[in-house]
Image (spheres, rainbow, N blue to C red):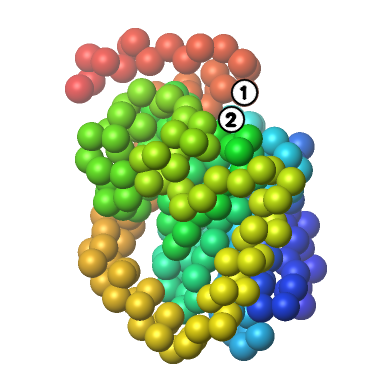
Amino acid sequence: MAQFEDITYQVDGPAGIITINRPQRYNAFRAQTVDELIDAFQQAWTDQAVRAVILTGAGEKAFCTGGDVKQRAETGDYGPSALGRFRIGDLHKLMRDIPKPVIAAVNGIAIGGGHVLQVLADVSIAADTARFGQAGPRVGSFDAGFGSAYLARVVGEKKAREIWFFCRQYTADQALDMGLVNAVVPAADLLTEAKSWVDEVAALSPTAIKFLKQSFNADTDHQLGLSNMAMTALDMFGVSVEGMEGATAFAEKRTPDFGPHVAWH
């Protein structure tokens, strides 16, 4: 198996457990992190012993806080990658395409692109200490693909617009009430609970589960086109003056000044 720097991957019985391991950056991902996540998901796909994948974060503070905005402020991008491009869209597609359930074990803050990852998971189990929300408009970023269109399928149009337009944060219980997660458990029990869900699905027909996942996805597969277009737009917007103001302000721990850009719209 490949040796990873930004994540860990282990097989525990029928569970493939992928952990984003950058707690010093609140498990924010850079390009290398995404490359490693893709590699781990592909390993889980081909391993017949793995019946479901658990995605979680290292430590107690954060599940994932999305793209590493500090990296973006420092270099203007998310750092070097194996193929020379930031493959977050590929990761999103892989999470949907892998013919095994993906279970997000949300151990802490799930914000921005990290929130999108748990939204794309087939089911989500949250620690009672978890918090959820989007932050894109606050830091000069957005996800106009799966992160918004699919989110609206999960929680409804009104709630999805609220989540994106106001960048509020929501508790685990609030997330459960809006259908954003499937269950809330004490933080100390999170991984045990996630493994028990894997054990349940491992007793069922893997072929039936594969067909069911593909059937659920078929209803929203058209959103992949929106996602591809959105990622292209985000690449351009991220290096614009307005986009960089968000990243720079975050790195400098100040409120961004988006006022000069209002006249453009």
Q: Is residue 34 visible?
A: no
Could you say which quadrant of the image residue 47 lies in?
Answer: bottom right
Q: Is residue 147 visible?
A: yes
Q: The C terminus appears in which quarter of the rendering?
A: top left
**Disc 1 element:** helix
Could you say which quadrant of the image residue 4 lies in?
Answer: bottom right
Which residue sits furthest left? Answer: 265
**Residue type pointed to by label 1:** Ala
Q: Position of residue 137 (x, y in %)?
A: 39, 28
Q: Is residue 101 above or below residue 228?
A: below
Q: Nearer the viewer, mark 1 or mark 2?
A: 1
Instruction: Identify residue for label 1.
Output: 251
Q: Which of 189 and 224 lies nearest the eye of the viewer? A: 189
The residue located at (51%, 50%) in the rendering is 183
The residue located at (41%, 46%) in the rendering is 180
**Disc 2 element:** helix
Q: Which of 45 and 200 lies nearest the eye of the viewer? A: 200
Q: CA distance from mark 1 to mark 2?
A: 7 Å
- Are circles 1 and 2 on residues that touch, CB within 8 Å? yes
Q: Position of residue 104 (x, y in %)?
A: 55, 56
Q: Which of 188 and 216 lies nearest the eye of the viewer? A: 188
The residue located at (47%, 59%) in the rendering is 123
Q: Which of 51 and 248 lies nearest the eye of the viewer? A: 51
Q: Is residue 89 above or below residue 60?
A: below
Q: Position of residue 69 (x, y in %)?
A: 58, 34
Q: Position of residue 99 (x, y in %)?
A: 46, 79
Q: The N terminus appears in which quarter of the rendering?
A: bottom right
Instruction: Identify residue for label 2.
Output: 73
Task: Count residues near mark 1 (Cα–Cα under 10 Å), then give few for <14, some for 14-19, many for 20+.
Answer: some
